[in-house]
Image (cartoon, coloured by chain):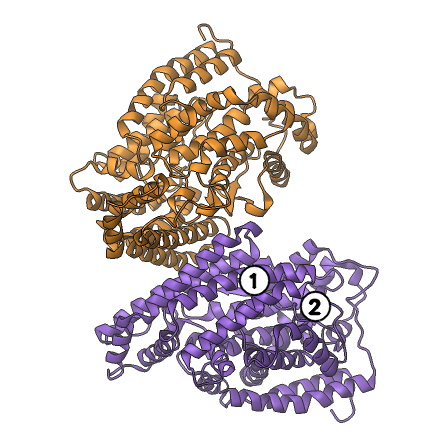
Chain colours: A orange, B purple
Amino acid sequence: MATADEGHDIESAPDAYRDLLERSEKLTNLRMASMALGWDQRVMMPEGGTPARAGQLSTISGVSHDLLVDDDVGEWLEELSSADLTDEQAAVVRELRREYERSAEVPSDLVERLAAHQAEAQQVWQEAKAEDDFEHFAPALEELRDLHRERAAAIDPDANPYRVLYEDSQPYLPLETVEDIFDELREGLVPLIEAIEEDGRELPSVFRDPEYTYDEADQMALSEEVVDLLGYPEEHGRLDTAPHPFMSGNQFDARITTRFREDDPIDALTATVHEFGHASYQLGLPKAEYGNPLGQSRSSGVHESQSRFWENHVGRTKPFWELFLPRMKEHFPHLEDVTVDEAYAAVNRIYPENLIRVEADELTYHLHIILRCEIDRAFVEGDLDVSEIPEVWNEKMEEYLGVRPETDAEGCLQDTHWSSSFAAFQGYTVGSVLAAQLDAAIREDLDVDGLVREGEFEPIWEWMTDHVHRYGQRYPTEELIEVATGEPLTADYFLEYVESKYGELYDLDGY
Amino acid sequence: MATADEGHDIESAPDAYRDLLERSEKLTNLRMASMALGWDQRVMMPEGGTPARAGQLSTISGVSHDLLVDDDVGEWLEELSSADLTDEQAAVVRELRREYERSAEVPSDLVERLAAHQAEAQQVWQEAKAEDDFEHFAPALEELRDLHRERAAAIDPDANPYRVLYEDSQPYLPLETVEDIFDELREGLVPLIEAIEEDGRELPSVFRDPEYTYDEADQMALSEEVVDLLGYPEEHGRLDTAPHPFMSGNQFDARITTRFREDDPIDALTATVHEFGHASYQLGLPKAEYGNPLGQSRSSGVHESQSRFWENHVGRTKPFWELFLPRMKEHFPHLEDVTVDEAYAAVNRIYPENLIRVEADELTYHLHIILRCEIDRAFVEGDLDVSEIPEVWNEKMEEYLGVRPETDAEGCLQDTHWSSSFAAFQGYTVGSVLAAQLDAAIREDLDVDGLVREGEFEPIWEWMTDHVHRYGQRYPTEELIEVATGEPLTADYFLEYVESKYGELYDLDGY
């Protein structure tokens, strides 16, 4: 295995491998340049910059595509298919072959149109959300869907376009596996949420006080303190604000954003810890492998396991609040009488009335995901017209969560994801499931509660680096999960975790 | 002439023209992407991001080079050399031909090495300046010089490498013309500065008070107010801080930076107005021509004429201080007793003891430039070893300005320019000379003093857009100057301006 300081063995490989690696580095650089420009667009860019930025992203995307599907790449891959390679070299070739094969059929022109439209649609979505005007976004959304379908058809004209798009973000994790896990979750979560609702008990919401407005600058200082505490290194990241929190970057420069609610500091705090989790994965990838798949994250599901682990299995535990509550009181002295138990209950309170996915609690969250997967699938498969989305969205919200958004800004316009992809929501739930599985595994090796209570987060980050991050794309997804946790992906740990935690918190019969 | 809303006539041109234009747009997008990544590197990027960012810039630079020197481009240009083109089409072809010819001989590999080294050298320079350690920077600087020489030799192996590099930044303005103007300036400025020094009078320095420290946030608010007053549009720009102020962007998104001195608010203020001037040029370029030379600035000298015009011919005039001093007093109430005459004198005070070019006054500034041109020329031509630079720098400072830097941070490490180019300093003095010439021309048409006094800056910006900006690269430099001002570039207006202004300010005999 390569250490962080030296890359994998290249010398032993044939020339074609070195050529392929050099091409991979160029492709990575272009992808990272696009990502940095996208960060800028969402965090720093003045609004009027959109036309030029859209052109830049479109050109980079087109150039990348040309470099990827170049005949040379096909020839190198052909030559390497019979070469004697080390395991790591073979992994690099496997990943680049997959990428090549998924792109070679997509015309460069379509790639450029898609990228240009994504940049514009992102801007239109921001305007539409700000003005609660779905019709303003609808034509852009329909065009996005059509372009993605066109792309799916180019990759595999015989396959269901939704499956093709799903495989973009979840390689090597069959849709069937994920659908089975979704079934298990539904069977487990629905009665649990019902039990909580029937019980009728309300956990204390000590951080929400109608008399008190949480100042943005103070909340930012709190977010800065929490990432500092967790070990986010100033020389390799930065924390800013954006309408929709996200992480962007690579092992040298992994930036995060958060955003604030005036009435609830927990919202920003959990978003910050969540995005820190994403950054921890990126920063744990081997630096010496920057530019090839061994230095790249495995999949969106595995990525989400890291954000969810830090958000829920660290940030929502009682030991964390033993550590953090006194610090929080320094920023917000009006909280002085809040106890650790109250804080722990408040951050774990279930809000079935909440409309916003990114603000959802650990249980109802997955119903938000199921709703999106259903709508996306129907929309991509052509069974749902764009104009029907707001109504269908609101109906499903009512059906699953008993609550109906009054505006599209709080409904189907809440998420930015359509501007970048379709069929990519599964990763969020896979992430939670895997986070619980990893949590069970790390607790076999480390006293996580004790470390968190002491503010010793480094051994936890190191364990994750050692079991997940350092491998990059060394293993296919299913195999990586086995290597990291000792068993295949399973919903068991997640269900055990939520049933035990919420059974206790809400004092539920039968849990 | 194209209006701002619609581009020039493309329909009438042969297919090769359209192909060329499409390529030009890709090249522009890649250049603008690099520029945005460079802005990010200097303003936002965490330090540890350098290796990845260097790779990104290097790849984009290499890809751009390949797209520019592609055989297709040569064929399109060949075909278009005998085509019947409109004046604007011919201008586009002239500029792209020049660019093609200057790049076709430079190997892609060299371009990539240079870009990667520039990104690294930028970081090393920042460290070296912070630690006042020239030796830390010397190897990087020598390597930069060697790479630039290699590039110059590839473009024209028979020419003086310094001249080749000069033509990068000052196309269509012969080095001889500039050297003649430098001679005239030397003849005019040396006795003027001597007269001021002999006179011994000191203008009031009312903004520098050893008892008072100017808060950074207050200075930033003042800078924000001044660009707002000048008409800098929030939707097309932003103001940040950077160690070395600069402007970056295009007609959709032109960003500026400034930096603060605790003991003198005029320093940041003039830097801000200066960079606003650069942005005004960029934002005055026709939006419909983004992507081709008609939508690009003419040269660094013309660019600098815009920054100098706003900095000196607006920002350092008495009418400006009549307008601005009351606003400044709102930010800094301790200045309440300062008069307009005192403020006007203070912002025009000559500081021969100053060591820093970007803080230099209007007269001594040009001696800083001459020093740099001499050192650059000797270094590029191989007559000066890198290790000799600090000593030669300090000697020349003593010879020309009577002052010797005590540290290299205040001496040869003060400027960032080596990390991007050599032989590019002439543009600063050309800019001042042209700014004075434009100032004489605009005053034939507009009551500039009256407008400035009333805070009506829009007609001034519009005049500059109408006479300079909107043409992009429609005319070669010498011709643009004649179109804009009615006569060729001349030092006369600059000398008249400084002799009259400083003769009056210092009450000098014979001026």
Q: Which three-letter amino acid code belongs to the residue tagged 1?
A: Gln
* Quadrant the N terminus of chain A occupies: top left
Q: What element carries label 2?
A: loop
Using the image, name the chain to which the residue with label 2 belongs. Answer: B
- What amino acid is labelled 2 in the image? Asp
Expressed as whole percent of the image width and height from the top left, the position of residue A411 reads: 39, 33
Residue B244 visible in rendering: no
Given residues A357 and A177, the one toward you in this image is: A177
Q: Is residue B498 left or right of residue A483?
A: right
- The image quadrant of residue B457 is bottom right
Q: Where is residue A199 in the image (x, y as percent from the top left)?
A: 47, 9
Q: In this view, does A419 lie to the left or right of B434?
A: left
Q: Quadrant of residue A396 in the image?
A: top left
Query: In the figure, is residue A130 to the left or right of B373?
Result: left
Q: Label 1: which residue?
A: B122
> Is B508 located above or below residue B274 in the figure?
below
Residue A93 vs residue B336, the one in the foreground: A93
Look at 63% across and 61% down and name the residue there. Answer: B243
Disc number for residue B408: 2
Q: Are marks 1 and 2 in contact (CB under 8 Å)?
A: no
Q: Position of residue A161 (x, y in %)?
A: 22, 38
